[in-house]
Amino acid sequence: MLVQSAMASATSVPISAPVTTVPFPAHLYCNEPHVTTQVCYNEVVPKMVDHEARRMELAEAVWRVIARSGMSGATVRSVASEAGMSPGALRHYFSDQAGLLRFAAQTMTRRVVARLKQHLANGTSGIELSWRLLEEMLPLDSNRRIEVIVWLEGISQARHDPELNEVKTSGWFGERYICRTAWAIARGLPVPQLLTEELTPEDEACIGKLHTFMDGLTLQALAFPEQVTPSHAAQQMRDFLSTLLSEVNSHRRAGDKTDRS
């Protein structure tokens, strides 16, 4: 259930070799440090401030507060305290709570996408690569658990925030694309080049089942960690994917026999 942004256009998202870059929101901050000034002994001394690094620290502070106190607890004051800065300093980066929360959700997406890229680039292939991609949707460790909590809190808040609602919708398509990519890799099919590019109706039906299963499994693993442990959740995902693949192969074999008779 990981959504992730001020997202790339659904009709123009390219895929990088060997498979693809999952289309999620672009980051909202610049990549170059900016110069502020500091008065010292009556002289103006340039001070380099890496705004990207600072904003990442703030995003992580938001995630910790949300995981501990929920979305409503992530106020400018509480996040500033968590980050070790004053509310006034935080407002230099974000004018209100809504902007802070949107940025935190989008930055979280960026982090997930970075992990997906690593899986796609590390030489893993076939069903094992499909597993690795799908595992990023599950709360299998503390970092991914926080990501799922933030995402679920964001879904709830999206009812009252149109911009978060856009992030939520983009996230659904992003998750579907992860499932479609994992399915295509497992089946040995070409990976779709665009977010809106679909496979055959039969494949899309299986992808829909996989997406729904992953969402349900994510909720269970988050809500009942003692009953659905990380290893149990990962194995359930693998078993379900194998079952879907077996069903498709059985249907195809049955169709081939019918065509020959």
Image: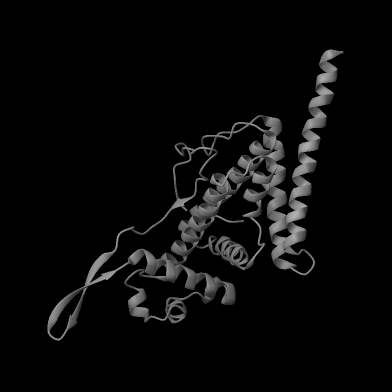
Q: Quadrant of the N terminus?
A: bottom right
Question: x and y percent of residue 10 in the render?
Answer: 48, 40
Does 88 sit above or below residue 253?
A: below
Toward the right, the furthest residue is: 261
Residue at 79% across, 26% down: 252
Q: Report the number of numbered marks.
A: 0
Near-viewer residue (136 or 251): 136
* Residue lying at 77% horizontally and 70% vertically, measured from the top left: 226
Indicate the position of residue 145 as horizontal and vertical percent values: 63, 65
Q: Is residue 4 visible?
A: no
Residue at 70 percent across and 61 percent down: it is 219
Question: Which picture quadrant has residue 35?
Answer: bottom left
In the rendered structure, the answer to whether residue 25 lies left or right of residue 218 reads: left
Q: Is residue 37 above or below residue 140?
A: below
Q: Is residue 24 visible in this depiction of the protein? A: yes
Q: Nearer the viewer, residue 149 or 121?
A: 121
Across and down, in percent, residue 221 comes to: 72, 63
Q: Name the outermost residue toward the bottom.
A: 41
Query: In the picture shown, does residue 197 fall above or below 2?
Result: above
